[in-house]
Amino acid sequence: MRIDKTEDAGNGSSDAPKKERGHVHGHVLRYMRRGLMVGAFLPGQVMSLRKLAAGFGTSPMPVREVLSRLVAANALEETKGGSVRVPRLSPEKLSDLFAVREMLEGMAAELAAKKATPALISELAAINKQLLVAIEKRDILNCLSSNQKFHFTLYEAAASDVLMPLIESLWLQFGPTMYMSLLIPSMPWNASDHEDILAALKEGNASAAKKGIVHDIRTTCKALLSVAGSQGIELPFAQGADIQFDY
Amino acid sequence: MRIDKTEDAGNGSSDAPKKERGHVHGHVLRYMRRGLMVGAFLPGQVMSLRKLAAGFGTSPMPVREVLSRLVAANALEETKGGSVRVPRLSPEKLSDLFAVREMLEGMAAELAAKKATPALISELAAINKQLLVAIEKRDILNCLSSNQKFHFTLYEAAASDVLMPLIESLWLQFGPTMYMSLLIPSMPWNASDHEDILAALKEGNASAAKKGIVHDIRTTCKALLSVAGSQGIELPFAQGADIQFDY
DNA sequence: AAGATCATTTATTGATCACAATATGAGATC
DNA sequence: GATCTCATATTGTGATCAATAAATGATCTT
């Protein structure tokens, strides 16, 4: 991830002046977005500007811009001191979040089903196969990654540059909580709804595809709420675990 | 706002000599958001970082953060050169935008209706009266401002911190186009749906309130599309008019 | 010994600097 | 006269600096 800078000990001798300028914050942004969705950050964790910058091997400036954008997308929240942290979701907010998910992603699925091509369907089937393998192995990281890939490639087919950013914003918000929940053994996890969705796509039944997505989201929401305490997901281990940048 | 630097044209809001640090970008953000919704910026207009900073009397740094956030919210788009500009909406995107508006704001209206208090209803009635006055006077600025106030105070009553940011993002996107459309004499503009919504709220009919909002949005969308050319709203005057910061 | 106060430390924030890429304009050439 | 080219200026990006405010730890007081 470090671009090319000097070995972080000294700054004076710019030996390799390869610039690669103008796209550092793009790298950082993609990294952080993926990290939020895939569980690299814990709810409640404070993101220190300088620590992050040091971790990425750049100056605080690009990181500042990225954090700004993530706060704007409600993926992060700022404390009174100006720091930003991963929000901890209350059960009420989580419920609201998934209610909106049902609407937005249901609409996206319906639109996508109307434009679905055989290539898309086979691609989704392949992704779902990866998801099933990850479930079998209890591989949380690939579970989340494959699941996200399934949903997003489906919605991408809707070709709506209005819906996608909104859906992404929602996923960034519940991503960290989603990861936490999968750590709990009692959390049910299957992909049966995905099979229904694939079947609906094959027969060109947009309404059924929408129903499948809505059911998938509703099931996930219920499972999440069942393991959520009064002030968010209860953790089976200490809160302060620093598992940053370890994937 | 202004710290202590050059004094070009007094801003007046700096009543206290206290530094007021840590809130400059907040001021700029509110100013820009309101400007976008109320029509201070034209679709297609490029926003120069340094020019904006000079206009606000601050360094480019807070402006950079604000523009970053607005880009993240899809209120602005970035050109290949890294500059940002107000997006020009195609009729297709505008249609998508309003379809999502119907869902999100319909849901918000329904929720709000279930929690509506007499105080809220009388407040909405007062706002609507201001709107009618603005329509009477053909005061575009107050038209947009009152209309936005009506919708947002209604949605605010839904008390959903999930829905509100999404709705705000949508309003920021169609705000500039909305303003342009009102410049066209043939654009119909009335608030009859608002009366229906108020009536629905008074009798506690959430479903009717939702229908009213959806009808309001759909009517606006149709009117906008009727005056929209193939690549966006056609302007009755030259494109380059610089009406920045004039309200 | 416990709590409060103060100092140190660290954090973000706004300003400024330096560099690169892009847009702009003038001038020369075909 | 139009177009291509080159020089200039402007813009965004990343890094660094200065100053303020919050957090933390140590010390003093009760």
Image (cartoon, coloured by chain):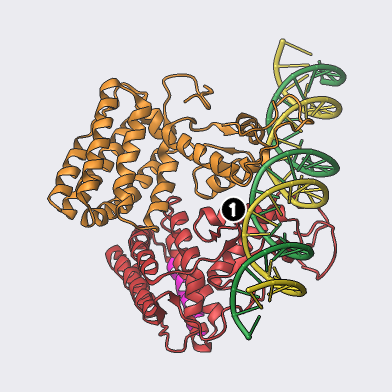
Chain colours: A orange, B red, C yellow, D green
Q: Is residue B175 above or below residue A128?
A: below
Q: Secondary structure at mark 1?
A: helix
Q: Residue furthest left?
A: A203
Does A44 sit left or right of D5 as displayed? left
Magenta-drawn stretch, dominant element (helix, strand or loop):
helix
Q: Is residue B174 above or below residue A52?
A: below
Closer to us: A90 or C15:
C15
Q: What amino acid is found at the position of numbered circle 1 in the picture?
A: Ser
Asked if residue A97 is among those painted magenta in the image, a careful observer would answer: no
Q: Is residue A245 visible?
A: yes
Q: Can you identify the residue that label 1 sits on?
A: B68
- Pointer 1 indicates a residue of which chain? B
Q: Is residue A142 above or below residue D18?
A: above
Q: Position of residue A199 (x, y in %)?
A: 14, 44
Binning the other alpha carbons within 10 Å of mark 1 as few (below 14), some (14 to 19) or many (20 upward) gives many
Q: Is residue A64 above or below residue A185?
A: below
Please state the extent of the stretch shown in magenta in the rendering. Answer: B120-133
Q: Position of residue B149 (x, y in %)?
A: 50, 69
Does B60 sit left or right of B184 as displayed? right
Closer to us: A34 or D13:
D13
Asked if residue B122 is among those painted magenta in the image, a careful observer would answer: yes
